[in-house]
Amino acid sequence: MAGRRGFNVCVVGATGLVGKEIISILEERKFPVKSLRLFASERSAGEKIEFMGEDITVEPLEGASFKGIEIGLFSPGASVSKVYAPKATSEGCVVIDNTSQFRMEPDVPLVVPEVNPHRIADYRKRGIIANPNCSTIQMVVALKPIHDRFRIRRVVVSTYQSVSGAGKSAMDELSEQVRMLFNMRGFECRVFPHRIAFNCIPHIDIFLENRYTKEEMKMVLETRKIMEDDSIRVTATCVRVPVFVGHSESINIETERPVTCEEVRKVLEDAPGVEVVDDPENAEYPMPVDCSERDEVFVGRIRKDESVENGINMWVVADNLRKGAALNAVQIAELLIKEYL
Ligand code: NAP
Ligand code: 3JM
């Protein structure tokens, strides 16, 4: 790799679902990588991961130096980012962090390139740019163009989140439970608090004092920060469903200005990063099986909420590992190098 033009990059959490997706998206989008270092826990140190035809050895994060690394793409979990993101920035590396650790800190920008790319400039404050939660990202990509045109007052969202959002061990747990159930054998619940196979669990992340989960409050607080509008009222119910990849959301919107489905459809058809799939007569609407391994946020089932004056219902699906995490982070890195580095 020596001699190639580009940036010295590292991926922290490189062996995880998000980290692996980041590595393949860097390659796929031809991100200008001069050198790539991969970090994970002691458990996977020494493993090899291929990048641009070369095997790169995974290094342990503990004790690592970030000197000379210009961009760090982090997804090792919040408690690990809490310690290692500040270490990396103190050694001159700009961190794009996928965890919830820094998202709500006022001096850390929280960025979705289709919505608030100008905020990337604030990376100078702490050296960190936060990537929002997967469910928030796909929702705001669809909400922003509607808000700009019709002013959103209130959003009621219910999510149907795939198990890949909870990491590789969660995907293994769903596969194993399905296998065990078909073989009439017993199984343990290690990642989820209940059986996830053929079930729905209305509990993602921890419960808070207000009886909402932390995942639900991420959607409320992050949406307001990204849209730069604290007047938008948001309420969420987040549910884990037995789908491997792809988060779905039922979104109800109330707007200040009068709105029709045709107008919403047109606004969304013209919006960056959105694809409208809405042909109910032919049974066409977005579904996780069709939207995984795709980059766009898919919107369908657009219809008037007939119970209020200016209301719209819609169904939004995206690949949570791509637009919900790795792709959004790489898009931020692309803008960072184009505009600022
Ligand atoms: P995963 O498949 O479980 O992978 C976790 C990764 O973190 C692995 O590479 C793991 O290394 C590494 N890791 C764990 N503990 C570590 C430590 N002490 N030091 C160094 N590396 C460590 O999980 P994932 O799906 O990739 O998600 C990882 C994190 O990304 C989540 O916890 C979450 O904070 C964030 N995330 C964000 C979004 C989003 O919407 N932005 C979506 C999904 C996840 P080993 O393989 O060595 O254990
Ligand atoms: C920890 O589907 C999910 O569970 C959401 C993704 C996720 C996050 C996140 O991005 O908020 C999984 C595990 C976190 C976190 O708090 O960083």
Image: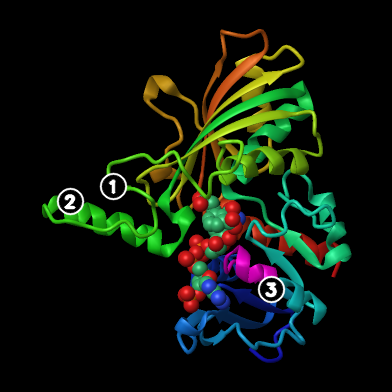
Whole-number angstrom distance, CA of label 2 to CA of label 1: 8 Å
Vertical placement of residue 22 versus 158, above or below: below
Residue that label 3 marks: 83
Vertical placement of residue 272 versus 132, above or below: above
Q: Quadrant of the C terminus?
A: bottom right
Give how far across and how far down residue 231 sits, in percent: 79, 28
Return the disc, 2 or 1, that comes first in the chain's sequence.
2
Mark 2 residue type: Leu
Give how far across and how far down residue 292 sits, in percent: 45, 50
State if disc 1 and disc 2 touch (CB < 8 Å). Answer: yes
Under tag 2, what secondary structure? helix
Under tag 3, what secondary structure? helix
Mark 3 residue type: Val
| Residue range (magenta) | 73-83
Mark 1 residue type: Ala
| Residue depicted at 56% across the width and 36% down the height | 211
Does residue 30 appear anywhere in the picture?
no
Residue that label 1 marks: 197
Vertical placement of residue 48 versus 189, above or below: below
Whole-number angstrom distance, CA of label 1 to CA of label 3: 35 Å
Give how far across and how far down residue 165 sits, in percent: 48, 53
Return the disc, 1 or 3, that comes first in the chain's sequence.
3
Residue that label 2 marks: 181
Give how far across and how far down residue 293 sits, in percent: 47, 54
> Was residue 78 drawn as part of the magenta stretch in this picture?
yes
Q: Nearer the viewer, mark 1 or mark 3?
A: 3
| Residue depicted at 72% across the width and 45% down the height | 114
Mark 3 burial class by Cα count in 10 Å: few <14, some 14-19, many 20+: few
Front one among 207 and 72: 207
Mark 1 residue CB less than 8 A from any atom of ligand 2: no
Residue farthest to the front? 209
